[in-house]
Amino acid sequence: MAKLRTSSTRSFLIPLLLAFIGLLLIPVALLIVYVWYVQVADLNWKATTLLLVAVIGFFVGYIGFLQVAKAFRRRFQDMIGAITSLMKGDRQQLKGEIAVSYSDEFGQLGMAFNDLQQFTSIKYANIEQELQLAYYVQQSLLPREEYELSNFHIAAICRQTKDVGGDFYDIVKLGDHKFACLVGDVANKGMQAALLMSASMSLFRREMNLGGSAGEILTRLNRHLYQALQAKIFVTVGLAIYDQSSSEETVEYANAGHMPPYLLVDGKLTDYIYPSMPLGVSPDSQYKSHKIELPAGSRFIMYTDGMIESLNGDGTMVGFEGFEQYLLQLESSSEPLQQVNHLMQQAVPTVSNKTEDDITIVMLKRLG
Amino acid sequence: MKAPSYMATMFRFFVLFLGGASLVLIWVTLESYYIKRLSFEYLMKFSIPATLVLLFGMMLTLMIFVALRLRGMKVILVPEHESEKSVKLDRVQLKLLLRLPSHLFWGTVAYGGVFIPVYHVVHYIVEGHSITHVDEYYRLNFLRSFLYEQTITLIAAIFHFAVSRRLIRPLLMRLEYVEDGQRQFKSFLSMLAATFAGLLLVLQFSILWYIMVTIVKGEPFELRVLIGLVVLDLLFAIAMFILLSYQFRKELVILIRRIRDWLRQTDSQGQDQWHGHERAQNQAHNDADAGGRSISFLPILSNDEVGQLAMSFNHLQARVSREYEELEQELRLARQVQEQLMPELDHFNGNDMIEVVKAEESSKPSVSNVFYDIIPWRHGYVAVIGSSALVGMPAALHISAAQLLLRAELEVVGEQLGSLELAELLVHYVERLKEMFLHQDRVSQISLFSQGGEISLAMAVVDEQQQLLRCATLGEHAAIWSEAVEDLSHSELLWQHGEVVTLSANNNSDKGPMKLRITHGLEGRSANG
């Protein structure tokens, strides 16, 4: 542990007391000087003048002392403010240190506080390192955010509410003119969801390599996940496969209990609702493939429920209607990555970038 | 700090009020004697006895008030030998206790405000004057007395405030921390300002009354007497201010000492065995094992900025504690998910080829970097143990993917398992696993495998029809041990590390039962340890 820091003791009492005595003496001295003057000059007492001198002296002393007392109070307020600002931050900032500007008891208290913060940092260093590495491992599983595959421009973004989470997306190139795009969400958040996220992704990549339609892939994926999860935890997935060789204008889509995707064509929005069971719930679930037409310039949007459940600035839920509004407000000419970033900013407007639930958005924009 | 008993506390408050009353009595007597130039005999006729009655009334009123206030708080007022443990006080009671000094302050001021005028009216009547015709001198004297004596009462009130703050401190020090984000604090600024104003007024009034008395009585003005009065008042003012401000200092020092003591205590607990970071981590585990509080909370000693500072500090500590408790809870849940991915071992008990022995789990909240699986196939079972070279959550992410992928791979292999070369199967599987994790387009350049995420595997295929056991291992941490030929003392060493899973399969080999054992953290050790 870090060596405990100490400072030379210069108590705040001494300057405070000196200020007190000084400010007490000013009005008294004023009165005594006036009394002495009246005596020396052999003048008559004037009650009003005497009272005026006393009142002026009182206010001079009182206002002066009030300023001293406020400066004294500011020391407390500075420290309280510094601690409170630490609490506004994330877990890392909670263990931050505060500035020590004084060499009296306030300085000592600040240093003691910082020693304690340092102790806390050391105490939890292992778990922090582990979580950071887990974050990198999870991030390394996700593909990059932007692709140009076949005649599509694809952009994706995934933001976890905790260090690691259960949302994921994958973009797998299956040839020069074929690719698959997956968005998934493991029920629950944090570490437990992350464990199944990595398992689901590895199984998905395996099943993609084995081939088949989108529905067949999800059916196989479900069987593996059900064996492992026994319906205790489930995973929702939306899978789109594009194969230019079979159809230039359609994408094959299969859904496993996931949020309905949207198609945005010329300012018109269509949602595709395919009721289905999430993966891992039933061993016999069969998933169907659906053909969705994607005309040139259209945008196909897949996302997780975190987007719908995110909160507006006024604390109300964004909901489907809100999300649809966000989609309709998007600049169709801008890059898909800019568009998904814009959507994410709508959902996570706060500085801390923290959300209630993980959020993932993937946009497929068909080029001309 | 030990808390006094109820009676001891009441006695201390009695002494406080006696002190406050004495202060008032001495001050007004000296004022009457030196400034008003009244004789002691004259004062004894009415002033001193009447003041004594008034002050006795004040003491009695304040004592009754304190007794009623503390009556509901007897839980914190136990004899000293029983007062070592922390106790809880509900929000309302705590608020009342914290406000006791300021209530005593206002109680003293209010008492003076009511009874000082009564005293003067009675005194006036006792001296035979008519209440309907008050002459100019007495009217002025009433005003002077009222202002001056109210100021003296104000000083007594400050005295009560400062000392009662000290008296309730041992009680507050005993209280357990209770998170209360709704608590409202008041600034000490008004109290400091009132103290200054009160003491300054005493000084100014002393000078003014002395001058007034000399004028009214036509006595000579003596600068020597005036300076003496000022010096006396000043000394008194300094003493009062030190008494009050010292309480602030003392409370700050208590906060500093509480943190320092906690840090020293935690530091010395592991001094002999641990150093640096390890010591802090060891302490964290000790705290968790003991189920005790692993952080230092500060007592709320007042209802002003000192208390607010302690409260902010406590909120921060509580938040840090909560954050890591949540993380630990998450780790426990993640561990449950891991357990769920493993097969239920009860299925294999009673099987004549497989016996499953699982190491005891650590009580600390952590996830495992090891997995085991027993997968039925047509002629028997495939038993696998896998281990990631990583630890904690990164390893858990790794092995959960590895385990589910292995099941899927073995499902494809299916029937061919009996004829496949197991080592080749393992190599093929790990290559597939790497393909999954080494995604060509991954965002981060940090690869699981470049972080030491290599996986070690031990696999045994049990063919119940042919009574055959075939084994293969891959990776630095995988090992197959046979109890018949290996030194068993080595096993003890392995078990110390917790993450040891042993699967044994009985066969007809002359080497006896074979054991598959995966180890972690014993790199470079030879078979005999």
Image: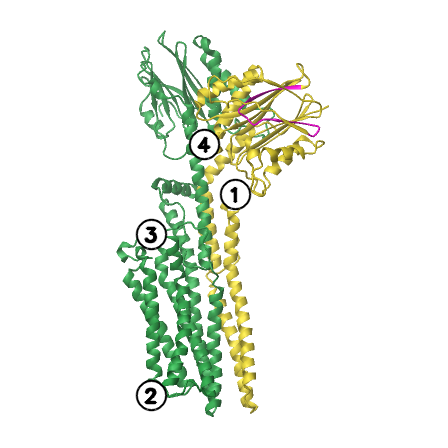
Chain colours: A yellow, B green
Whether residue B372 is situated above or below residue B366 in the rendered picture: above
Q: Mark 3 = which residue?
A: B87
Residue at screen point 49% across, 13% down? B412
CA–CA distance between discs 3 and 1? 32 Å
CA–CA distance between discs 1 and 4? 22 Å
Q: Is residue B500 left or right of residue A188?
A: left
Q: Mark 1 = which residue?
A: A90
Please state which of residues B369 and B37 is positioned toward the viewer in this rendering.
B37
Callout 4: SS? helix
* Highlighted magenta segment, given as a residue range: A250-267
Amino acid bearing label 3: Val
Q: Mark 4 = which residue?
A: B392
Callout 1: SS? loop
Same chain check for tags 2 and 4: yes
Same chain check for tags 2 and 3: yes
The answer to whether residue A65 shows anywhere in this view is yes
Residue at screen point 34% across, 28% down? B360
**Neighbourhood count class around disc 1 (C-alpha, 10 Å): few under 14, some 14–19, many 20 upward:** some
CA–CA distance between discs 2 and 3? 55 Å
Amino acid bearing label 2: Glu
Earlier-in-chain disc, 2 versus 3: 2
CA–CA distance between discs 3 and 4? 39 Å
